Image (cartoon, coloured by chain):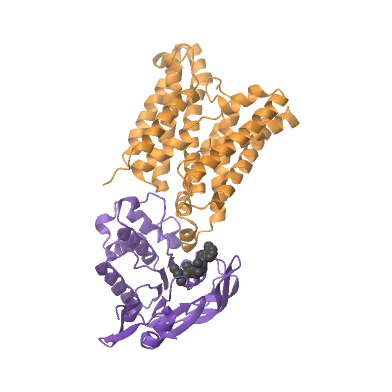
Amino acid sequence: MRLVPALSMALAALMLASLTVGAANVDLRGIFRDPQAMLVLLESRLPRTLAVTLTGAALSVAGVLIQVLVRNRFVGPDTSGTAEGAALGLLAITILAPTSALWLRMGAAALGAMATTALFVTVIRRLPPREVMLVPIAGLVLSGVLGAVVTFIGWQTDLMQYVGAWLYSGEFSGVIAGRYELLWIAGLAAGLAWLAADRFVILALGQQVATGLGLSTAAVMRLGLLVVSVVTAMVVTTVGMIPFVGLVVPNLVSRIMGDNLRASLPVVALAGALLVLACDLIGRLAIHPYELPAGLILGVLGAGLFLWLLHKRPSHG
Amino acid sequence: MIQIEGVSHHIGTAQILRDISTSLPEGRLTALIGPNGAGKSTLLRLIGRLEPLQAGRITVDEHDVARCPTGCLARVMAILGQQTAIASRLRLSELVGFGRWPHHQGRPSADDHARVAEALDAFALTPLAGRFLDEVSGGQAQRAHIAMAFAQDTPWLLLDEPLNNLDMSHARALMVRLRGLVADGGRSVAMVVHEINYAAAWADHVVAMKDGRIFATGAPAEVLTEEVLSALYDASIRVGQHHGRPLVLHHA
Ligand SMILES: Nc1ncnc2c1ncn2[C@@H]1O[C@H](COP(=O)(O)OP(=O)(O)O)[C@@H](O)[C@H]1O
Ligand SMILES: [Mg+2]
């Protein structure tokens, strides 16, 4: 596909731009003669750029997977109770063991995300498959209820500040070296999904076709659940949930190149990275030298893109 | 041979199949006929292990469908269900390509590609190969699903009402293709047919079902008679002859 090189080049360009934009002025041309600029670049700009890229790519791939798991295009990891589950896990570990190590917190977030996503998938798989619009509604309701539980516990335990950072203000301004590396795990998990791309396509074809082709769907579903949960948990833990990417990007790519995931997952990942990076850049430039959260820009842009998607008929040809 | 012994099936409190025992001969084209709701699809789904077996035993070429790993069975039989609607946006060539998955598990060889091309060609889909499933007609999508089962290249082919949505010429082309598989390829086909004259014209063996039971089995000339069909469908049905085969007349 020519899409991959085109998107790769666009992403490289935006990543370069992301390295230079910020409160402090960094000139990439003189970077090796300027230790101060080098420090800013390595400690802040590069980690931030990588964090944004990894988040966008991994969340988009997670979006494809949750859509496969519930066989519905109108859900994403932000409307499946996944992020709220991760926040519940984080709350639990923060309350029970406030000084716990990072890997423990990460594990708690992933476990929480897995539990609530499994709940969502189980509920949906029991619905009659024709009830297309029930699925996103059920997801929104579940996310809403879980979000309310998280908020309630947050109030009671004086942890509202954390809850806000996890769920309601996805942004990258706090990213510095040493505080974003968990996102590599999210990227890795998304890569793992690509290795099983064919299996996910067969899973999406339905139980009947999957059985006919000799695929045991349970193992594939568990893998999908694991990837969605780990990706979301890492994002929630490090930068806070970013809305809409996981919903919009898979839909856009499916419109253009279909659902053969072996070919389309790389495009999904690139497009997701590109979209979130663009939003982060807009957020940094809009009221320079101050910043708007990328999640906010994405909320607006994502909603617009999604409405456009709903109205545009798939192209024939 | 497919051996079915003492198979019963319930959904909730409703008994769908009652103690079915029969066999489907190897190297033959078997037609399953019977009124709506007789249990034909259920029986085919049980053979194809799309539904777990509740009581009884089914073996396909000596493979017990309840015991054999599903991946192994996928190289023994290909099954096309009655409901084929899928939500994925796949190109026809990609869908048919997945028929080869039981053989290569994600690493298609040149042989796999050749067989996909052959299957597309066999069902006149080559010009449509690059189209998405939601961009073709119902009959074209149906042919793509049949081509996918065909590409799976298994000794047994189980098809539930494959003629659905097909026009007369494509329906006949499919029957010719299936006959060829049986006569020249040594394969075995079991299919649910709604239009009884397709069974009359092309089948070697007929299994008639009614109310979850086997009503009659045998060669078309034995089963497709006025007495059997009239009792099977609870309607008076005339049967004539055409080129030495039964011809069922609906308008008598
Ligand atoms: N999910 C279900 N719940 C209850 N009854 C069902 C269900 N699916 C099928 N049936 C019943 O099982 C019987 C056999 O169905 P089926 O095997 O599809 O018949 P056929 O293919 O011969 O038309 C029918 O009476 C049908 O109403
Ligand atoms: Mg049926």
B108 vs B59, left or right, is: left
| Residue B75, image x, y percentages | 46, 68
Residue located at (49% from left, 32% from top): A54
Residues B31 and A257: in front is B31
Residue located at (66% from left, 33% from top): A149
Residue A163 lies, with reference to residue B145, above or below; the image says: above
Numbered label tally: 0
The answer to which image quadrant residue B185 occupies is: bottom left
| Residue A241, image x, y percentages | 55, 30
Residues A245 and B108: in front is A245
The answer to which image quadrant residue A165 occupies is: top right
Indicate the quadrant of ligand 2 in the picture.
bottom left
Considering the image in quadrants, where does the N terminus of chain A appear? top left
Task: Examine the rendering and report whether any part of residue B49 can be seen.
Answer: no
The hue used for chain A is: orange
The answer to which image quadrant residue B228 occupies is: bottom left
Task: Examine the rendering and report whether any part of residue A229 can be seen.
Answer: yes
B244 vs A170, left or right, is: left
| Residue A27, image x, y percentages | 41, 14
The chain whose colour is purple is B
Residue A151 lies, with reference to residue A226, above or below; the image says: above
| Residue B63, image x, y percentages | 53, 74
